[in-house]
Image: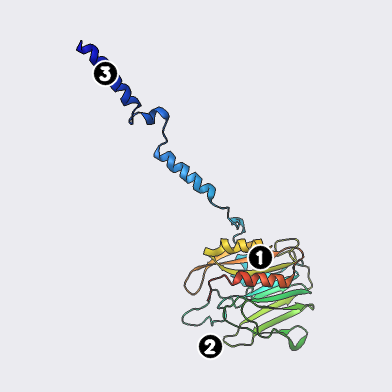
């Protein structure tokens, strides 16, 4: 009699253990911890935004300008923006290097076609500049920008062929003078800007850690990023990015200057 009673009891116990806390997971096919982690990783990957600057743009023209300090604009460039970078007025011979890069102007030397409008944009925070242009067929001073405050710009159109130079009338540490050169040639230039209808081309220096944010801002304003180049700055070695931007087609210079000022005011330079 006892055997008859124990048999069903043992059977019920086995069923309970199979469908209970120790067996339900196997019965319904639980997800392992590894699978959970994989799903989390996939979810995080899907949420990450696509890069704003394609990696294929790295190097190219931006790297060349950084290395050589030179740029040759194509015939399609009507407005060439030259950047006065932050802290470029410091003497390169100073014991404690205070500059971000070793160019007083970016690019420092340019080759353009007659009729090109050159625009100097002052990205040097807290410092004013006054550029005096000379050269060509006249020994006299051709143009002087006057006081150029931060995030402001001045322009001059070079209609005649020849070699020109310009310099800041302000002398800085150890008598350092910021200088640049412009060569205007009649020979046809290929589209060195990288585009076939790039009316306006220029450069900016942006902290690399903030590159995505400011690139998105520029793109929303109609700028196209041609190329980028990362480099450690000369003061503390923090990584900066030099970008070459374009505004294709018809573009208003005053609007571009306003956009550059509004974007540059967000940079952490001081």
Q: Nearer the viewer, residue 42 or 138?
A: 42
SS at badge 2? helix
Instruction: Read off the residue under disc 2.
Output: 174
Q: Disc 1 or 2, which lies upstream in sequence?
A: 2
SS at badge 1? strand
The answer, for residue 259, to whether it is visible in the render is: yes
Write the residue at 35% across / 28% down: 23
Residue 109 quadrant: bottom right
SS at badge 3? helix
Q: Disc 1 or 3, which lies upstream in sequence?
A: 3
Q: Nearer the viewer, mark 3 or mark 2?
A: 3
Q: Nearer the viewer, mark 1 or mark 2?
A: 1
Instruction: Read off the residue under disc 1.
Output: 245
Q: What distance separates the C-alpha of mark 3 from that of mark 2?
A: 100 Å
Q: What distance separates the C-alpha of mark 1 from that of mark 2?
A: 34 Å
> Where residue 128 appears, x then y in whole percent?
61, 83
> What colour scheme governs how the chains and residues are painted in the rendered image of this protein?
rainbow
> How many neighbours does mark 3 have within 10 angstroms: few (below 14), some (14-19), or many (20 or more)?
few
Write the residue at 31% across / 26% down: 17
Q: Nearer the viewer, mark 1 or mark 3?
A: 3
Instruction: Read off the residue under disc 3.
Output: 9
């Amino acid at each position: 009699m006892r055997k008859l009673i124990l048999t069903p009891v043992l059977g019920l116990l086995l069923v309970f253990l199979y469908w209970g806390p120790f067996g339900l997971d196997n019965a319904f096919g639980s997800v392992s911890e590894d699978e959970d982690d994989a799903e989390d990783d996939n979810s995080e990957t899907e949420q990450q935004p696509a890069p704003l600057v394609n990696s294929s743009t790295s190097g190219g023209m931006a790297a060349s300008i950084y290395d050589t300090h030179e740029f040759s604009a194509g015939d399609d460039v009507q407005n060439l923006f030259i950047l006065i970078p932050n802290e470029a007025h410091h003497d390169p011979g100073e014991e404690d290097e205070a500059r971000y890069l070793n160019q007083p102007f970016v690019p420092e030397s340019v080759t353009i076609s007659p009729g090109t409008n050159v625009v100097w944009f002052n990205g040097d925070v807290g410092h004013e500049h006054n550029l005096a242009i000379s050269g060509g067929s006249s020994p006299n001073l051709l143009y002087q920008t006057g006081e150029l405050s931060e995030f402001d710009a001045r322009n001059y159109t070079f209609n005649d062929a020849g070699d020109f130079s310009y310099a800041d009338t302000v002398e800085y540490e150890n008598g350092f003078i910021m200088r640049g050169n412009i060569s205007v040639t009649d020979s046809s230039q290929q589209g060195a800007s990288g585009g076939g209808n790039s009316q306006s081309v220029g450069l900016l220096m942006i902290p690399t850690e903030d590159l995505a944010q400011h690139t998105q801002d520029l793109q929303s304003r109609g700028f196209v990023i041609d190329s980028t180049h990362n480099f450690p700055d000369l003061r503390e070695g923090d990584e900066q990015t030099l970008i070459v931007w374009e505004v294709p087609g018809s573009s208003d210079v005053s609007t571009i200057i306003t956009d550059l000022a509004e974007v540059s005011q967000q940079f952490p330079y001081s």
